[in-house]
Image (tube, coloured by chain):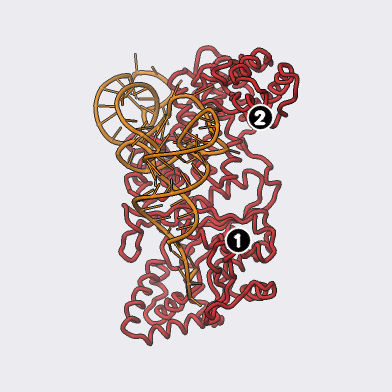
Chain colours: A red, B orange
Amino acid sequence: MDFKQSIARELVSALKTVYGQESLDQAQAAALLEVPPDTAMGDYALPCFKLAKTLRKPPVAIADALSGALNAPFLARVESVKGYLNFFIDRALYAGEVIGAALGAGDRYGACDLGQGRTVCIDYSSINIAKRFHIGHLSTTMIGNALYRLYNYLGYHCVGINHLGDWGTQFGKMVCAYKKWGDRAQVEAGGVDEMVKLYVRFDRESAENPALADEGRAWFKKIEEGDPEALSIFNWFKEVTLKDAERVYDLLGVKFDSYAGESFYNDKMGRVIDELREKGLLKESDGAQVVDLEPWGMPPCLIVKKDGATLYATRDLAAALYRKDTYDFARCLYVVAYQQNLHFKQIFKVLELMGYEWARDMEHVAFGMVSYEGQTLSTRKGHVVYLEDLLSEAIAKAREIIEEKSPGLENKDEVARQVGVGAVVFFDLYNNRIKDIDFWWDRALNFDGETAPYVQYTHARCCSVLRKAGQTDAAPDYGALADAQAQDVVRLIEQFPGLLKNALERSEPSLITRYSVDLAQAYNKFYYERRILDDDMGARAARLELTRATRNTIKIALWLIGIESPERM
RNA sequence: GCGCCUGUAGCUCAGCAGGAUAGAGCAACGGACUUCUAAUCCGUGGGUCAGGGGUUCGAAUCCCUUCAGGCGCGCCA
């Protein structure tokens, strides 16, 4: 039963009864309904100020008149308060309906067919070859992962794309350095760190010896031309980098369907240039080929350099065309930091000018910058936190706390991993994505308050109660859930499916993160105020159902943002 | 210089398709475990919602403006 729609329906007929006219239809009435700030004010409310204009009556009079004309069986009462019409749904009925819906859907509560199987491409994480994974890469990875799961859950088919940064002269230099000083076994063992060492040495020596830099460029040219030796070394670098990254991705539970990165589009840019030229969009400017975007208040989009080489924008256009051709997406998301706002605005505009209506299906999911203790991240200055180190610290801390609080726990290592990694991921997805994050160890490793461990603890607590309860045959007495604490939990559970749609529309995983805290808080209050394993078996059954619905909903919410829910901790 | 973003409690932030008394967490202080997991819960203090105008019955929320900080603005990605 959709209470909001039901109230809207009653409202329309009450308006007709009282004022004898169809001033609103049901959808309009539903849009006017809002949720009061406090449960004590009711479950839904209609502010009558807007109706005052059309009905030419004071708001208070409207609310008074309507409250007298409304008496649906599902409404416990309707009150007129200072121009607001407050609806109180029958609490037992409300609890029964909401819990029934949640438990009926089981581990798919909130899922739906919104996407109808349509495809959405999500470009996220997009790491660079031969560079270590650090905290600056966490947001794109986890926001992308959350959107991937969310879109899937709401009926879309997702294609997760790790658009690798695997193109540029630096790779020629690295191949060159490897040929001169490298050792295969050492690189295999040391991974990305060894490659970085080679690169640093090359940089240092080529500063004194310019011939070396030329040699590096020559090796890059070989890669470009498909020279077998150059290519095999370069591809091996990629493998080693991905193998390193895979350890982190495994810890985070992140997966991709495609690793087609920059080099993949190397032979696909001619098409873009030809097409732009055919459509009369290219023009010369200072020797370069550009698309003029002046009429839209933007600087020109550079397509071909003076020396004939292509650029970032060219590659992204090629990638967009390829993705449309290959996947026929209904939406295409780019989870990339906000520094690139202009870049994506330009790309989307160029696609539109090319005549592609699907340009409007593209979205840049921008997020804020990460700094470390108030300063910009800098690998060069060593002012950086590597993701693997951060996760290890978090897991170690979780392990310590387990040792202290649950020495008898069976799978301590597994739970430590779930809790430690969860804390880090939660920290990253906690605020609106547009906010900058200043990383401090003690904040990222905080396990109290609004954190993953807090929500996970609540989940484990629910599991524990359910285990202790065993089987009950008694019919639930939902009247036992009429108190304010239980009602707050019920209300949150009711809101979950709508919240997911909202999070998808806004591409905002933090809404789910916040929600998980709200639900955990509400449940913990309920837990303290009400005895679940009550002697009254009807009340016990109802509270157990609420506990089960809470547990399921928390587990789903956390899963959607990429966090596991241990059953004991 | 131009464009975009951000500014809410000591700190980190919710709230911003206008609505009832501006909320959490952290930090501080004080309480609650022989009772369903105390990684929890309850309480106390703490605010000119950056400043100023405007629109509105009603503004943290919308518009204008000033200030502060961040990001971006042709041959890097």
- Look at the image and tell me in which quarter the C terminus of chain A lies: top left
Asked whether, in this view, residue A170 is left or right of residue A257, the answer is left
Q: What element carries label 1?
A: helix
Judged from the image, the secondary structure of the residue bearing numbered disc 2 is helix
Badge 2 crowding class, 10 Å Cα cut-off, few under 14, some 14 to 19, many 20 or more, is many
* Chain containing mark 1: A
Callouts 2 and 1 close, C-beta under 8 Å: no
Specify whether A270 is left or right of A229.
right
**What percent of the width, then of the height, locates residue A536?**
53, 12
- Name above or below for residue A84 compared with residue A431: above
Q: Which chain carries label 2?
A: A
- Residue sitting at 44 percent across and 19 percent down? A529
Give the labeled residue for mark 1: A348
Q: Position of residue A330 (x, y in %)?
A: 67, 54
Which of the two residues, A528 or A432, is positioned nearer the viewer here? A432
Location of mark 2 (residue)? A30
Give the alpha-carbon distance from disc 2 to disc 1, as whole Å: 35 Å
Taking depth in this image into account, of A557 and A378 the one nearest to the observer is: A378
Type of amino acid under label 1:
Phe
Query: Residue A472's spot in the image, x, y percent?
Result: 58, 19
